[in-house]
Amino acid sequence: MEYRRLGASGLTVPALSFGAGTFGGRGELFGAWGDTDARQARRMVDVALGAGVTMFDSADVYSEGASEQVLGEAIRGRRDRVLLSTKASLPTGPGPHEAGSGRARLIGAVEGALRRLGTDYLDLFQLHAFDAGTPVEEVLAALDDLVHSGKVRYVGASNFAGWQLMKSLAAADRHGHVRYVAHQVYYSLVGRDYEWELMPLGLDQGVGAVVWSPLGWGRLTGKIRRGQPLPDGSRLHKTAEAGPPVPDELLYDVVDVLDELAAETGRTVPQIALNWLLSRPTVATVIIGARTEEQLRQNLGAVGWQLDADQVARLDKVSMRTPPYPYYPYYRLPDFARLNPPAV
């Protein structure tokens, strides 16, 4: 396993992390993701640690908190061997302190996560969404207090727009609060919007990308192809509307090239899609999820090798789409690119 620094921080993370969204199985959405119980989860953690995957990511909304609880049971007795990452801010109930990033909400969310995970500190705590109703100064002061209390070691954001992340970083610098060192983002061969603004921001500000849904919400598994029906076991039957939109033709075009590269390299379609991501600027770790041990072992095969320059160029060509204004001139017009070249 390769290990990398998370943004401009002293935290070293594995290139692949394990996402515990399949743990717990509560609710319509997360029940469709998976229903891994504590015994099965412990076996998954065994396999992950054996491959050098030491970081495990969850959130309070995953299976109504059951994901964190199952993960906590699975790592029991080996807390010192793992990095725990979780998230809060999305609504977990109708109460006034069950949503957002206000001080009371964040303190309560961290206390709840610590209890469910069976630990006294979080290695990485991320805001699951931007809370436009709470001043960023209050959010950052609360996070600063949590870090100085020892309950949280590093902080990050997730699903922020560029201006939201930059506003938060500027306020942190202005008031001397802890900075976000991670941005958990959607990024895949069929979803490259991250590159337009957030990737250059991450490069400039030292914010590392923690990539979620690197296989395009389950579309780059190698089981979905042009002219074929959606496989019966695909979670997309129940979850497609909740995930990032992907045009069918883009998906099929990308899968066609992935199939070609799979034949050339002897690797699987998801291994190639994950390996491409690991070579991108700012990417610190890619979160892989799995409902079965077989899926996990296959995804672990994404590391330890590299695509060659021609193969990367073919994937770039088929997956890249012209970004919207004001980004497209920097990708298409030489004069613009000279002044401010794209990050990729």
Image: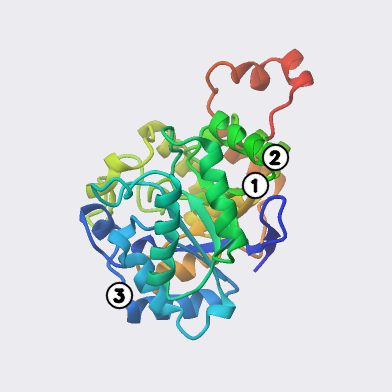
Look at the numbered disc 1 and give the secondary structure of its residue.
loop
Disc with the residue nearer the chain's start (2 vs 1) = 2
State the residue position of label 1.
179
Q: Are marks 2 and 1 in contact (CB under 8 Å)?
A: yes
Give the tally of numbered discs: 3
Residue 173 numbered mark, or none: 2
The residue under the point 37% across, 60% down is 21
Look at the numbered disc 2 and give the secondary structure of its residue.
helix
Q: Of 2 and 313, which appears nearest the observer?
A: 2
Disc with the residue nearer the chain's start (3 vs 2) = 3
The residue under the point 23% across, 47% down is 94
Query: Does 53 sit left or right of 308 as displayed?
Result: left
Quarter holding the C terminus is top right
Q: Real-space Cα distance between discs 2 and 1?
A: 7 Å
Residue 182 drawn at (x, y percent): 60, 49
Q: Real-space Cα distance between discs 3 and 2?
A: 42 Å
Q: Are marks 1 and 3 in contact (CB under 8 Å)?
A: no
Query: Does 52 sit left or right of 232 as displayed?
Result: right
**Which residue type carries mark 2?**
Asp
Asked if one can make out residue 319 in the rendered structure from this viewpoint, the answer is no
Quarter holding the N terminus is bottom right
Q: Real-space Cα distance between discs 1 and 3?
A: 35 Å
Look at the numbered disc 3 and give the secondary structure of its residue.
loop
Residue 108 numbered mark, or none: none
In the rendered image, the vertical position of residue 119 relative to residue 3, given as above or below: below
**Which residue type carries mark 1?**
Arg
Residue 37 numbered mark, or none: 3
Query: Does 181 sit left or right of 92 as displayed?
Result: right
**Which residue type carries mark 3?**
Asp
Q: Of 343 and 229, which appears nearest the observer?
A: 343
In the rendered image, the vertical position of residue 76 relative to residue 147, given as above or below: below
Q: Residue furthest bottom?
A: 77
